[in-house]
Amino acid sequence: MTLKQAALDVREKAYAPYSKFKVGAALRAPSGTVYHGCNVENAAYPEGTCAEAGAIALMIASGETVIDELYVVADAPNPVPPCGGCRQKIKEFAANGDVQVTMATLDGVEKVMTVAELLPGAFDADFLDKN
Ligand code: THU
């Protein structure tokens, strides 16, 4: 299963009754396994979660911790970039700054950016080390 197909399929399952904006995400871990996620909204709006966060949660719950590649798709005129919070979540697990994030529309328009491009100057665990 390609990342694109996995993201398209899981997008259909998104729970987005408030925004009506369904998003699907799929990532590949070093094992080759594809983990997917969709946005899950809530009547208490801030409690909603993004598709990327869902895919990362599934990866972690499955015992893997590294993202080699990520694909995000939404029904929008232009490829939708991950929100700021998701950029930080992606950065936490990306194999390195060169990991590619493909953003896509349902019409097949794709834009590729690296994790380093999406989140320059990222805060990471190194900053927690006081020594
Ligand atoms: N959303 C995602 O799931 N991923 C993104 O990259 C952008 C935004 C969701 C959050 C919310 O459920 C809806 O899209 C509208 O913001």
Image (cartoon, grey):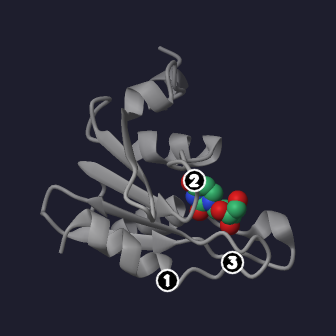
Left or right side of 79 for 34? left
Tag 2: amino acid: Pro
- The residue singled out by tag 3 in the image is 16
Q: Earlier in the sequence, mark 2 or mark 1?
A: 1
Q: Residue furthest right?
A: 44
Badge 3 residue CB within 8 Å of ligand 1: yes
Say if 69 sits above or below 113 in the image.
below
Task: Identify the residue at image location x=50%, y=29%.
Answer: 119
Q: Earlier in the sequence, mark 2 or mark 3?
A: 3
Is there a contact, CB below 8 Å, between mark 2 and mark 1?
no
Please rate how many residues cluster around mark 1, counting C-alpha atoms within 10 Å: few if below 14, some from 14 to 19, many from 20: few
Badge 1 residue CB within 8 Å of ligand 1: no
Please rate how many residues cluster around mark 3, counting C-alpha atoms within 10 Å: few if below 14, some from 14 to 19, many from 20: some
Q: Quadrant of the N terminus?
A: bottom left
Spatial separation of the CA atoms under disc 1 and disc 3: 10 Å
- The residue singled out by tag 2 in the image is 77
Left or right side of 30 for 81? right
Spatial separation of the CA atoms under disc 2 and disc 3: 18 Å
**Can the viewer see residue 45 in this picture?**
yes
Tag 3 secondary structure: loop
Q: Nearer the viewer, mark 2 or mark 3?
A: 2
Task: Identify the residue at image location x=26%, y=40%.
Answer: 95
Please rate how many residues cluster around mark 2, counting C-alpha atoms within 10 Å: few if below 14, some from 14 to 19, many from 20: few
Task: Identify the residue at image location x=29%, y=65%.
Answer: 4
Label annotation for residue 12: 1
Q: Residue furthest left?
A: 31
Spatial separation of the CA atoms under disc 2 and disc 1: 18 Å
**Can the viewer see residue 62 in this picture?**
no
Is there a contact, CB below 8 Å, between mark 2 and mark 3?
no
